Amino acid sequence: MTSKNYRNALLFIGLWWGLVSAPTAMAQPPAPALVTLPLAALAQGKKVTVLQQGHPDSDLSWTIEPHYAAQQAKLQVRYLTSPATPPGSQLLVAMDGQIVGAVTLNPELPRGSFTVLLGHQAFAAGVHHLVLRLMPGPVAGGGPAAATSAWTQIDFTASQLSYAQQVIPWRHLDFSHLPGMLQESAQQGSLPLPMQFYGVANTTLLRAGQEAVAGVALRSPAAVKVDAHATASLAGAAPQQAANGLRVSAALGVASAIPPSLLPQTPITGPTILLEHDPDNALGVTILFTGKTDAEILQAAQAFAVNRTVLPLGDRWNVVNEGDDLSDASFGPKDAVYPGEPITLHDLQGPAAASTVPHSTATISFWMPGGLFASRQSNLKMALTMATQSLQTSSDKPIITVLANHHWISEWKLTPGVANYQTTIPFTALVAGDNRVTFHIVGGKVSVFPNSTIQLPAAHRYAVLPDLSLFQRTGFPLVANGTGKHLSVWYANGPLSDWSAGLTLFGRLAQASHSPLPDARATFSMPTTRNVLAVGTAASIPAQWLSASPLVPKNMGIQWRVSTRHGTSPWLGATNHLAPAYLIESPTPYPGEVAVTFLASSEAGLKTAAWHLVEMPNWNGLHGDLAWETGSGTFPSTLVGSHFLYGSRNSGWFWIFLFSVKPWLWVLAGVAAVLFAALVVWIYTLRKKAQWRAEEAV
């Protein structure tokens, strides 16, 4: 072989090895992370323990979460032994029933510490039992060792367990593991979600993406930050690989457009959801939504979003038909109370509602939709079955105090034993979103049975808007019911460019409304009906869309106006210095509907600005009708435009609501009634006088 051929052969081998080994190197798990735990963390916060006669052992439970393994585990123990400790006494350490180390105690050196290696093997996921045991030596004079008064105190705060935590790939993927996967993927309150689209861009595929994001968001308290990518056939962008590490990603597309490496050997015959190992990330898991058509993909994504408790076994979920799992499912939150519908605590709180142990405080938490209005005389009705246990030191009946959202409501006496009680809470004491009813018991303890019920009164949809705080807490007014049937999501920049931002905001909206919103639409053109979540840039959102808002893009800048007593003023000013992004709540150009518009100054900044907006401090701080992003990624907000009333005018309840939010109208009505009565009396008096004159003339 010539030197040239030899060099070519080496070059070919090196190139082949690089292509083969590169994916393997990328798929390697990250290096183990060093973890240090005080023993107090394994002892439910207990700071010290004393080993002595009758209590020579201290049992600790060390739990290793699934998907993890512990290597090079070491235990460092700090102790204090008594002067009466017999010579030859030992402090033993056992792990999972096997002694792994011991130290001889010396009463002349009472304080000491030692470190022991718990084992050379790696500890798998599960519960491991760590035991510290005192073994007294022989007592001087030949007495029995058990008769000594020796003791040894272990400092659980200073003693610590250290190990190298290794993340291991999931061996068996199962939908029951999905909540744990999402929890591991979350980082500081945020859940990154790479999302890959395969196929041709259309609103059906995008709606499926919305439902997929909603299904993930409702399974995690973290803010979902979507990073959408697409194949060349969808938008000309090459797929990007997720970062190596704990990561859950999503993929959507018809089976014919998905790479064979992601598809199972069994053919796809209908709407299907799969859990797959990420081929580019050893620790990654991909949720794949597929089918023969885009409509079947949407059907699969809706089933995934709606059914969050009853999940199939294994890594494949076949949605049998269009009505499968959807007709009997609850679109709204499990902890929601709706007007006029009684609900038991078991249905409201699940197994946690069965309180068999009496307590001196009982709490009922529930979520209430936004935009509800009822008369001031309306009440939340509670039919409670409670078991009361009186304190032995008290001869009087226990007294229960009812608080709603920390406001005092009522106080009454309880009958010892099991009894039924009925109480009410004024509707005005409740708030849109999370509510908390607390029962404080003096002189006894109670347990509330899960068959107890609560029922909201009949209510109507009226609210004073704009109010971004109501939007971030409940999704109202964009979401006025559990399905989102009056909601459209407008992606103004067209395919893919603002999908990441729109899907990120849709995930937060699903969390705020506690609903997957399966009836929400997606559109690439400006809507003409429905409430709208609009996402775009200053160039793609026309000024006509924001004609009723306090802020509108104009000539590559921003023009604004403020509210006055007489309504909205003319334009007061403009600037060419755009903020990175704006969030605006305002009426739509067509009557009766409301829009929340997310507006970025550039297409490149849409995704990052949306990620900043959904972060907990920014999202929870929204109020008024306008929020804007600062250079540091925060979103201050304020009220700029005028208030308006939301709700149907074709009902007498509108006037009741109007007078409730504007009490001074009662004064005007009273004055008008008095003036009208005075006018009637004056006219009547004039007629009587005229009649008297006529009679006198005769």
Image (cartoon, rainbow, N blue to C red):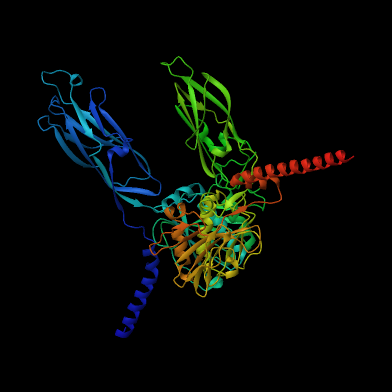
x 17%, y 35%: residue: 103
Farthest-out residue, right: 698
Image quarter where the C terminus lies is top right
Residue at the extreme top? 395
Picture quadrant where residue 102 is located = top left
- Residue shown at 13% from the left, 18% from the top: 142
Instruction: Identify whether 201 is placed above or below 145.
Output: below
Is residue 554 depicted above or below 87 in this figure?
below
Q: Quadrant of the N terminus?
A: bottom left
Q: Horizontally, is 544 left or right of 223 in the view?
A: right
Residue 151 shown left or right of residue 512 in the figure: left
Q: Position of residue 648 (x, y in %)?
A: 68, 51
Q: Is residue 261 visible?
A: no
Instruction: Confirm whether residue 344 shows in the render.
Output: yes
Nearer-the-camera pick, 416 or 264: 416
Q: Nearer the viewer, residue 640 or 301?
A: 640
When asked about the image quadrant of residue 80, the answer is top left
Side of 19 relative to 111 (left or right): right
How many marks overall? 0
Residue at 74% x, 43% y is: 682
Q: Position of residue 209 (x, y in %)?
A: 56, 60
* 118 sits to left or right of 371: left
Q: Position of residue 322 (x, y in %)?
A: 67, 53
Residue 351's x, y, as percent? Answer: 52, 35
405 and 211: which is toward the camera: 405
